[in-house]
């Protein structure tokens, strides 16, 4: 019930990583993370999935502005010191999915 209440306002079908801690007295706590970067990249590029042969084929494009927006959303879960480092991390994920970074 607690998880359903916490995810009530989120968009339907969005994958949300969760860390669940169960205690001996049968209680639990959970921490919700932001959706994966791959989800945001696929959504920005308008794709259903990434490249089958990453590094050999390009299946779509994303702009630097889209990367910055994704990095701002994911910043709380990334281990980057600043926004520019986070953008570079997201750009690396995009390239590994077969997306070309333009602009």
Image: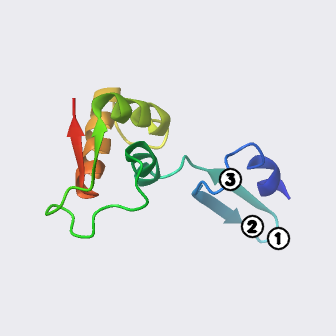
Q: Is residue 41 left or right of residue 2?
A: left
Residue 2 in which image quadrant: bottom right
| Quadrant containing the C terminus in the rendered view | top left
71 vs 56, nearest the viewer: 56
Q: Callout 1: helix, strand or loop? A: loop
- Which residue does the numbered mark 3 point to in the structure image? 12
The picture places residue 29, in percent across and down from the top left corner, at 73, 57
24 vs 98, nearest the viewer: 98
- Which residue does the numbered mark 1 point to in the structure image? 26
Residue 57 in which image quadrant: bottom left
Mark 2 is surrounded, within 10 Å at the Cα level, by few (under 14), some (14 to 19) or many (20 or more) other residues, namely: few
Q: Residue furthest right?
A: 1
Q: Callout 3: helix, strand or loop? A: loop
76 over 25 or under it: above or below: above
Label 2 vs 3, first from the N-terminus = 3
Q: Callout 2: helix, strand or loop? A: loop
- Which residue does the numbered mark 2 point to in the structure image? 23
Tell me which residue sits at (21%, 69%) in the image.
53
What coloring was used for the rendering? Answer: rainbow
The picture places residue 69, in percent across and down from the top left corner, at 42, 31
Q: Is residue 92 left or right of residue 73?
A: left
34 vs 70, nearest the viewer: 70
Cα separation, mark 2 vs mark 3, equals 30 Å
Residue 86 in which image quadrant: top left
| Quadrant containing the N terminus in the rendered view | bottom right
Tell me which residue sits at (58%, 57%) in the image.
15
Task: Using the rendered image of the protein, determine whether residue 4 is visible from the camera's viewpoint.
Answer: yes
């Amino acid at each position: 019930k607690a998880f359903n209440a916490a995810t009530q306002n989120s968009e339907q079908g969005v994958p949300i990583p969760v860390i669940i801690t169960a205690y001996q007295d049968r209680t639990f706590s959970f921490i919700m993370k932001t959706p994966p970067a791959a989800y945001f990249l696929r959504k920005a590029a308008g794709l259903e999935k990434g490249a089958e042969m990453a590094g050999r084929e390009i299946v779509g494009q994303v702009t630097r502005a889209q990367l910055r927006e994704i990095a701002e959303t994911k910043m709380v879960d990334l281990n980057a010191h600043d926004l520019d480092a986070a953008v570079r991390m997201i750009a690396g994920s995009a390239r590994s999915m077969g997306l070309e970074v333009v602009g």
